[in-house]
Amino acid sequence: MIKGVGVDVIEVERLRRSLERCKGFRERIFSSREIELCLRSRDPFPRFAARFAAKEAFFKATGLKIPWNRIEVLNDPTGAPHFSLPEPIAGRLHLSLSHLKESAVAMVVYESL
């Protein structure tokens, strides 16, 4: 049974400005593993934006209050995105991400077991 759905869209440029202007913003939002993963890309900002959107969608779908940088958006060996959380939640999460140069979108479905 579906417990919640969350969707978020963000402009890549808006997030880039926040990351460049706000001291400590990147570390408050992203884990060290996420930062390392995004910085491997020639243009890391669409990847940061997709992860930011995923976290916003996570909060909308679950209603949980977890620090931003403790919710990790990583990739499995096939490249599919998934959440890595500090503690298990009662249910299953499904995550879909997409990004272009200008925008990123994420959708999360929170399902009971």
Image (cartoon, rainbow, N blue to C red):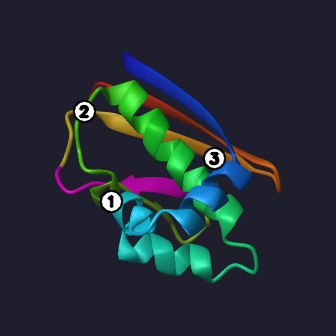
Q: Is residue 69 above or below residue 55?
A: below
Stretch in magenta:
81-87
Whether residue 61 is in magenta: the answer is: no
Q: Image point 40% across, 26% down: which residue?
A: 61
The residue indicated by pointer 1 is 69
The kind of residue tagged 2 is Leu
Q: First in sequence, mark 1 or 3: give its number.
A: 1
Q: Residue 12: where, in percent of width, then height?
A: 71, 52
Whether residue 83 is in magenta: the answer is: yes
Q: Image point 24% across, 33% down: which residue?
A: 64
Identify the element where label 2 is drawn: loop
- Checking the image for residue 97, the label placed there is 3
- Checking the image for residue 24, the label placed there is none
Q: Quadrant of the C terminus?
A: top left
The kind of residue tagged 3 is Leu
The residue indicated by pointer 2 is 64
Dot 1: within a 10 Å radius of its alpha carbon, few (fewer than 14), some, or many (20 or more) residues? some
Q: Is residue 113 left or right of residue 26?
A: left
